Structures are given as C-alpha cells and as structure tokens.
Amino acid sequence: MQVNVSKPETKMSFTNKQMNVADKVVPILLFLCAAVSILTTIGIVYTLFSETISFFKSVPIFDFIFGGKWSPLIEPKSFGIWPLLSGTFLITLIAILVAVPIGLASAIYLSEYAPERVRKIVKPVLEVLAGVPTIVYGYFALTFVTPLLKSIFPDMSVFNALSAGLVVGIMIIPMVSSLSEDAMSAVPKSLRHGAYALGATRFEVALKIVVPAAFSGIVSSAVLAFSRAIGETMIVSVAAGSTPNLTLNPLESIQTMTAYIVQVSLGDTPHGSVEYGTIFAVGLTLFIITFLLNILALYVARRFREEY
Amino acid sequence: MSTATALKTLINIKDLDLYYGTYHALKKVSMTIPEKAVTAFIGPSGCGKSTLLRTLNRMNDMIIGTRIEGKVEIGGTNIYSNEVDVETLRKKVGMVFQQPNPFPKSIYDNIAYGPRLHGIRSKAKLDEIVEQSLKQAVLWEEVKDYLKRSAFSLSGGQQQRLCIARALAVNPDILLMDEATSALDPISTLKIEELVQELKHRYTIVMVTHNMHQAARVSDQTVFFLNGEVVEFDQTETLFSNPSDKRTEDYITGRFG
Ligand SMILES: Nc1ncnc2c1ncn2[C@@H]1O[C@H](COP(=O)(O)OP(=O)(O)OP(=O)(O)O)[C@@H](O)[C@H]1O
Ligand SMILES: [Mg+2]
C-alpha cells in the first residue's frame, strides 16, 4: 500500500521588522550615554586649559613652575607651585606607604588564607568602609589620630601632614585590597596546585605564584590608590592645615593642591581675578600629574603582565 | 588475586577510607605499588582514581572537609602520621596534572621554580638542573635556544613535557600522573608514553588513565577501581589477558563504563 503524502513546502523568511528597529536605535542610545561622559571630560579639560592660559597672561609661567613660595592671596604675592606640590607629595607618599602594604597583605590573606566563611564577611565590610564619607575620616584624623600622634611627637602642629596622610592611607586600604584580591582570585587554581605539588608552602605560593600572576591587577589598584590619594580633599582640608609650606617634614602644617582649590573656591576671591585664576592653574597641574601617572601605570601593567 | 612480587614494594596502602564530607569516596582500599615500575589506575569516571592518586602526595589535604582513615606507607613511613612534613613529602612525590599547567613565566623559570623553592641559588647549579630535567623529559633539543621565552609559547604536548621536567627538577622518587595525556594529540601522547618507559628506570610512576590501550602499553601493574573500591590489581599482562573478576573483564572488554 502506498500513501501519497504531500509534504508542505518549506517556507523561509529572514526578516523581522521589530528587531531591525531595536537594533538600530539601541546602539545610538548607548552611544549618546557614552558621549555624555566624553563630552563632559572634554568640557572640563577645555575650561582648565583656557582659564589657565589667561592666568599665565598675568603671571609668568616661569614663576609658577620654579617658584618656591606660594602666597597668591597675601601681599607680597608670589605664585610658586612647589609648596603645594610638596604638600601633596607628602600626603600621597604617607598614604601609599600605609595603603599598599596593608592593602596587599589583606588581599593575600583574603585570597590565599581566609576560609570561605571569613571572606564572605570581610569583603563586604571592606567595601562598606570604602563608602564612608571622607569628611568623617577628616574629623577622625583631627580629633583622634592627631592627639594620639601628639603623645608621641609633642612638638607636632595640630594641623599636620602625618595625621592626614595616615588617614588618607587608611581610607584607601579597602580599595587596594578589594581590587588586588579580585586580581589574585582570578589566578587559576591549577597554577597554585602546580606549585603546591612541587612542595611550596602557602606563603611561597602566594608570594611567588599568585602575586606575580596578578601583578598587573595589583599595579592598577596601587595606581588608583595613588590617584585617590592625590585627589583627596576633605581629609587634608580638615586635618593637614592651610599653610603652603615647602617642606618634607610630616609633622608640620602644609597645604595640598586640592585643599588650596577648596579654600579659594569657598572664599570671597572675586571671579575673574588673577587670584581666582590660580585654582585653574593648580587644577591643571593636578590633572597633568594624575594623567601621567595613569599612563605610567598602563605601561607598567603591560610590561610586567604574566599571561595565563 | 596475585601481586607483582618480582619487584620491591615502595608504596603500601592499607585499609584506606576517604570521605569528602559525608561522601565515602574510597572504601577500604588496600594495595601495594612496586618501586621503579609503572602502575596504572583504570576504572569508570568518578570511581576514585584521582582521589587515590592525590592521597599519595596529600593534595587532598587542601580540599576542605576531607577525612582519611587507614594508612599510606611510602618506604615504610605512614605519610599521614604527625611527624611527616607535607612540603618534603610533595618534593619526593611529584605530580603531573591532566591539563598542562605551566606557570606564566619563562621556560627556564618554570623548571627552576622548584629547585629555587628548596634553596638552590647558584646559577651554575640551576642551569645544570634545567638542562638535565629538560633532557629527561625529552624536551631539551626543542627548547634549548628559547629558554627565556614564555612557557605559553609551547604547544600543548610540549607544555605537558615541560610540566614533567618541572616535576623532575626537584628530584622526586615517585611521579604521579593524572590522565596526563588526555588533553593531547596522538603524537604527543606517544611521546609521553615513550618518556614514561624511559623514566621508570629511575622513578616509580603511578598513572591514571582512561585509555585501556595506554595502560596495557606502558604499565607493569594495573589496578581496576569501581565505586571507590579496588576490584582487582595485578600485573598488567595478567589483568588484561586473564582477569580474575567478572567486573574487570566486563570493563576491559568495553561492556560497560
Ligand atoms: N573536591 C571534592 N569534593 C567532593 N566530592 C568530590 C571531590 N572530588 C571528587 N569528588 C567525588 O569523589 C568521587 C571520586 O572522584 P575522582 O575525581 O577521584 O574520580 P575519578 O575516578 O578520577 O574520575 P575521572 O575519571 O572522571 O577523573 C566522585 O564521585 C566525585 O564526585
Ligand atoms: Mg580523575
């Protein structure tokens, strides 16, 4: 018996109007969102440059770059950036010396030693710590750390670089440890096993396998920490003083670039005056330093990258 | 059940039970492993071959919730007794993994990693160890001019031989290989099989394999596992030609597993 089955014809269609519209509109929307941040950045950089250029029409750029005294608001006026640079440098150095070793050590602990249970609790706590408003840290420095330090260094000024630098360091520890821990956790288990199988101890595995393999991530976290420390404003305004001071003595009162900008912005310096223009020149200096640091970081991270 | 009595026993496993939490992964395992010979572990997936292999260098210690009862004696010492130093044990019992896992370092530094760990600093001595180990792993001719290159520039088969060389560089007595050829192409596999034949004159080798032909080709003694138990262990020839247990016969003839 033979049945004549007629097969339905295969109909194929490859169009979908709705999809096409979404596919065209969505990228445009996404592009616009990206464009907002790019345009903002361009706007900021433009303002910085144009205001700085008009500032240098009244103040010689040579005095700014090579001058050792900063007193733009008090006669006799001088516009040497170095005291603000040294203040910023001092704070950043102290902060980095605190944050990188402690942050890295806690990252190693979390990724290599801590039981799962401890990690689950500690990581979120660290991240909350990173969200504490900086003004809180500022008053912590002024009312707790400074008196503590004063019992060790009785001659120290009430406003000083040491206290502010230490607290800036404490503030950025969570960032360093969290980012470094991410980089270290991403190192494949198989590499650790390979080292353990050769008779390496936990510490040797952490130091000679995990840290080198995660090095580029660790460098990135250190550089971010650097940028945060350089840009930190509140803590230094509250606890480090407002005396531009060309010194590397951490016990003295200093002023950072950021704290200076705040001081002028909040003061009654008339807009458009030369004094007001200083904040753009200082801001641009800050911008250039951070920018160069980031480029350096990219280079270092690439140079020492271990692929796995 | 007859044992390979011609060879001197190096590893003696007695009534070994292993639990992952509540899961009973090895059940009253007893066997002897002869010195300077190749012993192969075969059996279906999940029967506990890797688990038993890892008890020999105590890599199971790192898996949380693992509990062990019974004895594993190597050269007469129970490696689970308190006075045993795990790092020294692992130096003596090397391991090669299923996936090649070179460190993200140069070829040279991969080999030198172990010796440096154990305190060798002299450049001349390290050079010598690197050359010797690579020669033993039959990789020297291929890489001698590229020692500073990243280990990742090597092919998979070369990487696995590098891992073998890395294990040999710390001068072990025993070499554990967990399906060390399963990620490799046939030619690389053959190379490593030949290498194993060479190495067994100096080292005691214990290998896990899913490839019955491989077990038949390279091993002197074969152990057949099922559900965490040793069903049978014997000289390879005997086990394959004349198995004493019905289940072994079914497995090697491909009727299950
Ligand atoms: N880390 C672990 N935690 C819990 N159970 C595990 C763990 N590792 C293995 N097991 C279980 O123990 C049993 C034996 O595993 P094992 O890896 O030793 O098997 P195997 O014989 O090597 O298998 P395969 O041939 O697939 O590699 C399996 O049932 C597995 O699920
Ligand atoms: Mg396995």
Image (cartoon, grey):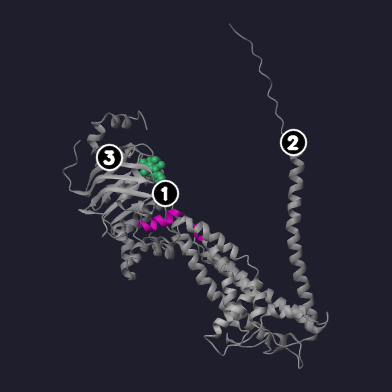
Q: Quarter of the image containing the N terminus of chain A? A: top right
Q: Residues within 10 Å of mark 2 (few under 14, many from 20)?
A: few
Label 1 CB-ligand 2 distance < 8 A: no
Residue B150: where, in percent of width, then height?
45, 60
- State whether discs 2 and 3 lie on one chain: no
Query: Would residue A138 be found to the left or right of residue B257 on screen?
Result: right
Query: Would residue A212 be found to the left or right of residue A248 on screen?
Result: left
Q: From the image, tell me which residue sits under label 2.
A: A16
Q: Quadrant of residue A164?
A: bottom right
Residue type of the residue flagged with mark 2? Asn
Q: How many numbered badges does the structure rendering display? A: 3
Closer mark to the observer between disc 1 and disc 3 = 3
- State whether discs 2 and 1 lie on one chain: no
Note whether A255 is above or below A134 in the view shown: below
Q: Disc 2 versus disc 1: distance between alpha carbons? A: 45 Å
Label 2 CB-ligand 1 distance < 8 A: no
* Farthest residue, direction top: A1
Marks 1/3 in contact by CB < 8 Å: the verdict is no
Residue at image point 69% right, 79% down: A259
Which image quadrant shows ligand 1? top left
Q: From the image, tell me which residue sits under label 1.
A: B99
Residue B26: where, in percent of width, then height?
32, 42
* Farthest residue, direction bottom: A76
Q: From the image, tell me which residue sits under label 3.
A: B223
Residue type of the residue flagged with mark 3? Val
Tell me where the magenta segment starts and ends, as one range: A183-197
Note whether A70 is above or below A36 in the view shown: below
Residue at image point 31% right, 57% down: B90
Residue A165: where, in percent of width, then height?
59, 78
Helix or strand or loop: what does disc 1 sit on?
loop
